[in-house]
Image: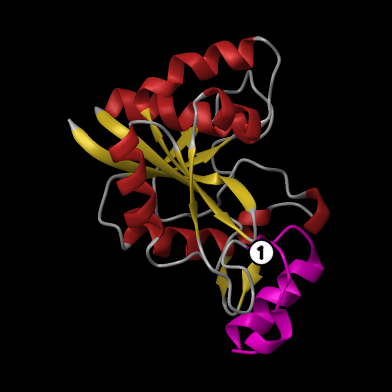
Amino acid sequence: MTDLVAVILAGGEGRRIGGNKPAVMLAGHCLIDRAISHVSGWHIPARVAVREPGQAGSARMPEILDDLRIAGPLGGLLGALTWAKAFGARRVITIPCDMPNLPEDLKTRLDAAAARFDRPAVASSLQRRHPVCAVWPIHCLEPLRIYADDGRLSLMGALEICAAVGVDWPVQGLDPFHNVNTMDDLALARRSLRGDASDFDGIRS
């Protein structure tokens, strides 16, 4: 078996930023390529989860499909766990395509916690959990299918039923889990990449 595989969640519509979020440009690179570059540095098997084939454009990584019966990011998580189980992995780490400033030690710290406690480990910052950034043991798949079949879609609720542990990151400047949902969010990310860190004290993702 493989200890850990990775999935980038890219199945959202991105309506608040005009659609096609994976292709949104940030400092010369689209968001999906930034996410792929981050994951590629982990040197583990990885996929991009989408709701429609080709949704991630010309992404340099194979696609898998969300669980199309389930709306929202929970569908992406179920798709990720289903693929990871078939691949023979023990755990899967998920990140979204719209968090371009993720910490370098994300995989190391999350996977260490998940392996130690044999339950999900979720990133947090500024006293807030980020459920799209988490490591999920494969044995969570069946409880989460039951959870979804009951009509529940919240990733926060999914963390609760699987008794997830939190792993906290300190914030200096812009939250490393800042996500790009709007043009204002994109502007903040651009300013952060330019090194204007003093502009972001106390700003949540």
Q: Quadrant of residue 54?
A: top right
**Callout 1: SS:** loop
Q: Which residue is mark 1?
A: 24
What is the x, y in percent for residue 185?
Answer: 75, 67
- Residue found at the far left of this picture: 1
What is the x, y in percent for residue 56?
Answer: 55, 49
Residue 183 falls inside the magenta stretch: yes
Q: What residue is at 61 percent from the left and 55 percent from the top?
A: 22
Closer to us: 183 or 203: 203
Asked whether residue 9 appears in the rendered view, the answer is no
What is the x, y in percent for residue 24?
Answer: 66, 64
Closer to us: 66 or 4: 4
In the rendered view, tell whether residue 15 sits above or below residue 36. above
- Residue bounds of the magenta highlight: 178-205
Q: What residue is at 54 percent from the left and 36 percent from the top?
A: 53
Q: Is residue 164 left or right of residue 83?
A: right
What is the x, y in percent for residue 195?
Answer: 59, 89
